[in-house]
């Protein structure tokens, strides 16, 4: 059920609030993994270049090293593929930037190419759901490389440095696999169980609409767990672990559909058991699990959505990125700033799923960057004592950025900003005051111009996607309802329909929330959204209770306890 009030009037201009924008959250459970991986990937190449007296080449090795920030939430087989694609994408963007820089020094052309690269990187990262840090790191590297003097003869060597560091980053990202080979999938399953337990525990303490956010968070965690598990092999040694975890995710889904029949403490106990290296707990309902997992097999048999179809809905976001980055870079040039790519990257970092989230990110970016400029003023005297201290300060800030950014984006930016400023001094020390002024101005210019571009480029397709999501949810509910009306549906058919309905309702809530955050959007079908969610969740609960009463595989029949 939605917490939104059903309405069908014209859509007003939505107020852009500052409430909660800078509020700190609990840190990510694995905050230390990207932080340590970043240091482990960046330190050896930088220290080697320091020993060789060629810190001026550090930008190229950092292009590959920063790939270690990606894919920490993915199983290792999927992580290997994702990291490989990230490294290739990083090198591809760097190659385009270096070739462009070698062919022209026209700043307007360089900004234009940087903006187009940023739009492509944004669209591809969102379409493939590569996860944080998304397109920002890719755009930072390619945009900075555009403004480094280059010749065609130097490009192969520079790309080789990036590729070598990228291979090292890949090895760093895969390093935990021998120690905890099932860590990512166990962690994703535990998060789904805890989210379902939180909703089940809160259910019944007030109006059902009051718990809609907890339920939406639960379904999102369950969907994330399924995406993680479906990336695992279906055969071989890892298949047994996968099937055991699938049974637990099914129990989390059941808890979300029928919270009144759920024991939250049991879910939490299962989640706690998954945190360590103990055996995966059993649900104690093997016949039920066998039928329910047929729904997973049905999902595996479905064809994935082609990449070009996933790119289509992202066209407005890509257009915002291209226009905003270009205008921010041009504005910086007009002000005489020597590094317009800072304004370009600031704009690229703003664009989120809708305008409301983009506004929040703009505020966080400005606050974090300006605080980071002040931190740079305090650190610079120490870093200027020697190149070794310069490298060590960058490593410390690198760790701090990844450790803090999950608390809130602005807090991580406090460390990212001085780190980026210190990296510019690898080729030689610069005037601290000039760097601070240029970075502060570019931050404000990039955020202001980038946000104005987001206001201009409206996402008129958002309303259409809500209509499509409502229709998909209604069809999924009707399919499940038809199977519920049958006295003996085919094995696994009802479970497949239930899982399909759960996915459709999750997509509907995410789509509706995204569209609601757009400015000057057309009126959304809020009544249809609320009715589709209410009827869909009732059907989910009915399906769970129907499956709780099933013929035993032995003699006679018995009633199974639906408590997961």
Image (cartoon, rainbow, N blue to C red):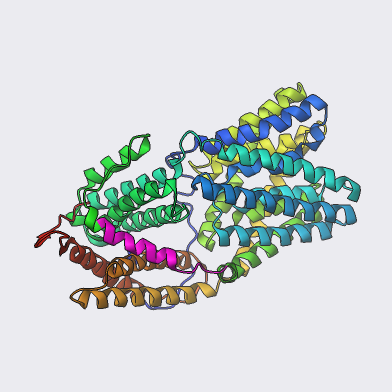
Residue placed most toward the observer, 61 or 138: 61
Residue 406 visible in this rendered orientation of the protein: yes
User: In which quadrant of the rendered view does residue 154 lie?
Assistant: top right
Position of the N terminus by quadrant: bottom left
Left or right of 356 in this view: 241: left
Residue placed most toward the observer, 165 or 410: 165
Chief secondary structure of the magenta portion: helix
Residue 204 visible in this rendered orientation of the protein: no
Task: State the count of labels.
Answer: 0
Q: Position of residue 504 (x, y in %)?
A: 38, 68
Left or right of 518 in this view: 493: left
Residue 227 against residue 25 in the figure, above or below? below
Residue 278 against residue 113 in the figure, above or below? above
User: In which quadrant of the rendered view does residue 268 lie?
Assistant: top left
Residue placed most toward the observer, 53 or 280: 280
Residue 303 in the magenta stretch? The answer is: yes
Q: Position of residue 42 (x, y in %)?
A: 67, 34
Left or right of 494 in this view: 319: right
Q: What stretch of residues is rendered in magenta?
A: 289-306
Q: Position of residue 434 (x, y in %)?
A: 78, 38
Residue 539 in the magenta stretch? The answer is: no
Residue at image x 51%, y 38%? 177
Residue placed most toward the observer, 175 or 308: 175
Residue at image x 89%, y 51%? 152
Q: Position of residue 44 (x, y in %)?
A: 69, 30
């Amino acid at each position: 059920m939605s917490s939104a009030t059903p309405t069908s009037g014209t859509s007003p201009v939505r107020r852009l609030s500052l409430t909660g924008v800078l509020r700190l959250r609990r840190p990510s459970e694995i905050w230390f993994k990207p932080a340590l991986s970043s240091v482990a990937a960046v330190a050896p190449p930088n220290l080697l270049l320091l020993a060789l007296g060629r810190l001026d080449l550090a930008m190229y090795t950092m292009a590959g090293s920063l790939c270690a920030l990606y894919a920490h939430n993915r199983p290792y087989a999927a992580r290997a593929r994702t990291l490989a694609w990230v490294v290739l994408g990083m090198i591809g963007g760097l190659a385009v930037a270096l070739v462009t820089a070698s062919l022209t020094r026209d700043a307007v052309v360089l900004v234009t190419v940087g903006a187009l690269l940023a739009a492509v990187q944004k669209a591809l990262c969102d379409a493939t759901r590569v996860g944080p840090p998304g397109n920002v790191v890719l755009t930072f590297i390619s945009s900075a490389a555009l403004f480094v003097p280059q010749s065609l003869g130097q490009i192969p060597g520079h790309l080789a440095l990036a590729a070598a560091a990228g291979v090292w980053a890949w090895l760093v990202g895969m390093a935990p696999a021998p120690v905890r080979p099932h860590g990512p999938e166990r962690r994703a399953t535990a998060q789904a169980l805890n989210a379902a337990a939180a909703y089940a525990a809160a259910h019944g303490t007030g109006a059902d609409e009051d718990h809609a956010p907890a339920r939406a968070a639960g379904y999102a965690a369950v969907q994330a767990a399924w995406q993680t598990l479906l990336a695992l092999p279906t055969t071989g040694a890892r298949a047994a672990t996968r099937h055991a975890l699938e049974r637990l995710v099914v129990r989390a889904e059941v808890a979300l559909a029928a919270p009144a029949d759920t024991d939250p403490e049991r879910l939490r106990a299962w989640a706690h058991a998954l945190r360590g290296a103990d055996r995966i707990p059993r649900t104690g309902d093997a016949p039920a699990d066998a039928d329910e997992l047929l729904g997973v097999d049905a999902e595996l048999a479905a064809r994935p959505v082609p990449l070009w179809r996933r790119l289509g809905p992202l066209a407005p976001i890509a257009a915002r990125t291209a226009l905003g980055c270009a205008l921010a870079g041009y504005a910086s040039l007009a002000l005489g700033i020597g590094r317009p790519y800072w304004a370009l990257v600031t704009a690229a970092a703003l664009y989120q799923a809708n305008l409301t989230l983009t506004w929040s990110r703009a505020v966080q970016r400005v606050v974090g960057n300006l605080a980071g400029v002040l931190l740079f003023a305090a650190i610079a005297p120490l870093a200027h004592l020697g190149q070794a201290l310069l490298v060590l300060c960058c490593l410390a800030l690198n760790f701090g950025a990844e450790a803090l950014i999950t608390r809130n984006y602005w807090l991580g930016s406090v460390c990212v900003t001085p780190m980026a400023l210190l990296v510019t001094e690898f080729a030689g020390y610069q005037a601290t005051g000039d760097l601070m002024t240029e970075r502060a101005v570019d931050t404000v210019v990039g955020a202001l111009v980038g946000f104005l571009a987001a206001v201009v480029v409206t996402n008129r397709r958002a309303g259409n996607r809500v209509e499509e999501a409502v229709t998909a949810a209604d069809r999924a509910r009707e399919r499940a309802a038809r199977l519920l009306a049958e006295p003996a549906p085919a094995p696994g058919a009802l479970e497949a329909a239930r899982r399909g309905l759960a996915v459709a309702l999750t997509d509907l809530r995410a789509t509706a929330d995204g569209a609601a955050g757009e400015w000057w959007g057309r009126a959304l079908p809020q009544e249809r959204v609320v009715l589709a969610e209410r009827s869909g969740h009732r059907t989910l609960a009915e399906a769970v209770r129907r499956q709780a009463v099933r013929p035993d595989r032995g003699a006679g029949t018995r009633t199974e306890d639906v408590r997961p």
